Image (cartoon, rainbow, N blue to C red):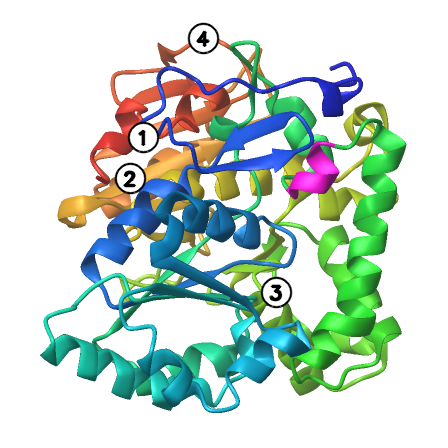
Amino acid sequence: MGDLGDTHSEAYRVPTDLPCKSSIAWHNYNVVIPRLATKRLRGALRAFPAVVLLGARQVGKTTLATLLADEEGDRALYLDLELPSDRAKLTDPELYLASREDKLVILDEIHRTPGIFQVLRGVIDRRRRKGTKVGQFLMLGSASMDLLQQSAETLAGRVTYLELTPFCAAEVVKNGTSVADQLWVRGGFPDSFLASRETASFEWRRAFMQTYLERDIPMLGPRIPAETLHRFWQMLAHAQGQLFHAAPLASGLGVSGQSVTRYLDVLVDLLLVRRLQPWAGNLKKRLVRSPKVYVRDSGLVHTLLGIRDQEELLGHPVVGPSWEGFVIENLLAQAAPSTNAWFYRSSAGAEIDLLLELAGGHLHAVEIKRSVSDPRPSKGFHLACDNLKVRGRWVIHPGRERYPLDARTEAIPFTEAARPDSRWLANSR
């Protein structure tokens, strides 16, 4: 995989086979990358009075929202609540919003004014009585649990939630070719992926994590020493894709098991870490009960471990778990919101990397392999599939060809599986 070169001067075209060739895109100088979440966002605004767009810092929420505001023209009003001038406009939010009932109001950094949800409920209900039922408020947040809890309790039945992830493989197509390896190494945060050089990408990610630890996380509430949380984050990167056991982590940090669990909750709430729960549908079998934990962005995994480029990554022990987490994030980013995801592991050795419940309640099993020459799954994978009576069996690999491994199992290239129109995901829509 070569460097992208000076990406500030190169444009990524919109793939012709994507379902959302939209003007809503992520812009970086001359780089234009359409976001697949745009279609869902528009649909949500057509169906609900209020939409909360969640996502980690710097994934492009503000860009997506402001471009939507540009499309709406005079019908949209954008307020950045990190600016004192915009916060001052909401000193009396009921009065301010009452005179703007014909507009889509976009509230960025909504956690800055948590008390506004009660006001929004009254405004929404008043507009409903006048016949305006949908597309009234778009709120952007970094996914603190307080924000979710307050909005869910106050705006029940009036709000829906969408997540904007970092770039996924279906979004980064350059000259008709996926640059998935570049995405895997650098991760999907736009400024990291679009950096002009590998060193610039690495330095951006390091600064990003430092800002999160020293400013963003304390601002959102948790009082955890930045150095302690950074060490914990590094431990999770070293244990990428492994079962979460609090005791050894607590011992390494010199804190209690409860503290370690709280640290994990913080990173999960901020959409920086995924806690993949084990399948527990069959209580008669002895199944693993601990979750598996993944640092969600592969670029952050590599930065936490000091891995600067693909050459270093391919020689590092984390290469397999990093690839596994990268594939899981990309597949789940394309799946329908109703998709449920687990892993499966029994005491007898039966194991499935990713177990998906798609539309209709049918289970599908995914094995993730880094090997191109021999991507065949283990006997434990087939044993688990037989136990669960799964409908589909897929092995996702980094090669280019799709072919059957046996009568029930198919090998699918990652770049095909990560496409939103891929046949194996069609059943989820």
Q: Would you name the residue on which mark 4 appears?
A: 401
Above or below, 110 relative to 61: below
- Residue 324 appears at what percent x and percent y? 57, 38
Residue 23 covered by magenta stretch: no
For disc 1, the neighbor class at 10 Å (few under 14, some 14 to 19, many from 20) is many
Circle 3 is placed at which residue position? Answer: 244
Distance of mark 4 from mark 3, alpha carbons?
35 Å
Task: Work out which quarter of the rendered image holds the C terminus and state it.
Answer: top left
Q: Bounds of the magenta span?
A: 189-194
> Does the residue at mark 1 contact the one at mark 2 (Cβ under 8 Å)?
yes
Callout 3 amino acid: Phe
Counting residues from the start of the chain, the first of labels 4 and 1 encountered is 1
Q: Which mark is residue 272?
A: none
Say whether disc 1 or disc 2 marks the residue closer to the N-terminus. 2
Q: In the rendered structure, which disc, 4 or 2, sits on the residue that comes first in sequence?
A: 2
Q: Residue at x 42, y 54 (%)?
A: 346
Most foreground residue, 380 or 417: 417
> At which x and y percent is residue 200?
86, 36
Instruction: Give the quadrant of the N terminus.
Output: top right
Q: Secondary structure at mark 4?
A: loop
Residue shown at 65% from the left, 30% from the top: 183
N-term-proximal mark, 4 vs 3:
3
In what element is the residue under mark 3? loop
Label 2 sits on residue: 364
Under circle 1, the secondary element is strand
The residue closer to the viewer here, 371 or 47, is 47
Query: Given this view, does label 4 or label 2 mark the residue nearer the observer?
Result: 4
